[in-house]
Image (cartoon, rainbow, N blue to C red):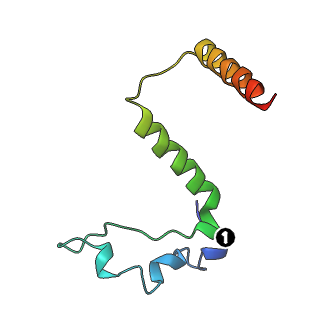
């Protein structure tokens, strides 16, 4: 999934030819690529999806709350907030 604006006529992605694509920090000791620079301007929506996936993975081992319990907790918070503002 490459934005049309970054494709070359021969189908290669422009980022592969950028001066930073082969920066030593982006390769391990054997020369294998270990990092990539991705334009947020071109790939913003994809980054949002990636962020959602990372958050889900980070929370996978956390305890869960049923929807019913969550609604009750929100109702209690709403009632407490109304009491403070009155």
- Identify the residue at the far right of this view: 86
Q: Which residue is mark 1?
A: 4
Quadrant the C terminus occupies: top right
- Identify the residue at the far left of this view: 29
Q: Nearer the viewer, residue 43 or 67?
A: 67
Residue 30, how many percent across, how many down? 18, 72
Q: Nearer the viewer, residue 70 or 76?
A: 76
Res. 67 image quadrant: top right
Is 36 situated above or below 48? below
Res. 42 image quadrant: bottom right
Quadrant the N terminus occupies: bottom right
Res. 82 image quadrant: top right
Q: Nearer the viewer, residue 63 or 12?
A: 63
Residue 58, how many percent across, how many down? 41, 39
Is 83 situated above or below 29? above
Q: Residues within 10 Å of mark 1 (few under 14, many from 20)?
A: few
* Residue at 59%, 65% in the rendered image: 2
Residue 66, how many percent across, how many down? 55, 15
Residue 24, how many percent across, how many down? 29, 80
- For residue 85, side relative to residue 73 (left or right): right
* Residue at 57%, 48% in the rendered image: 49
- For residue 51, side relative to residue 85 (left or right): left
Total tally of numbered discs in the picture? 1
Is 31 situated above or below 18? above
* Residue at 60%, 19% in the rendered image: 70
* Residue at 69%, 23% in the rendered image: 80
- For residue 31, side relative to residue 83 (left or right): left
- For residue 14, side relative to residue 57 (left or right): right
């Amino acid at each position: 999934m490459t934005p049309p604006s970054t494709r070359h006529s021969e189908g290669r992605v422009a980022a592969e030819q950028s001066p930073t694509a082969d920066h030593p920090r982006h390769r391990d000791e054997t020369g294998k690529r270990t990092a990539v620079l991705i334009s947020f301007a071109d790939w913003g929506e994809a980054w949002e999806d990636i962020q959602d996936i990372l958050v889900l993975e980070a929370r996978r081992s956390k305890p869960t709350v049923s929807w019913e319990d969550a609604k009750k907790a929100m109702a209690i918070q709403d009632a407490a907030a109304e009491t403070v503002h009155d």
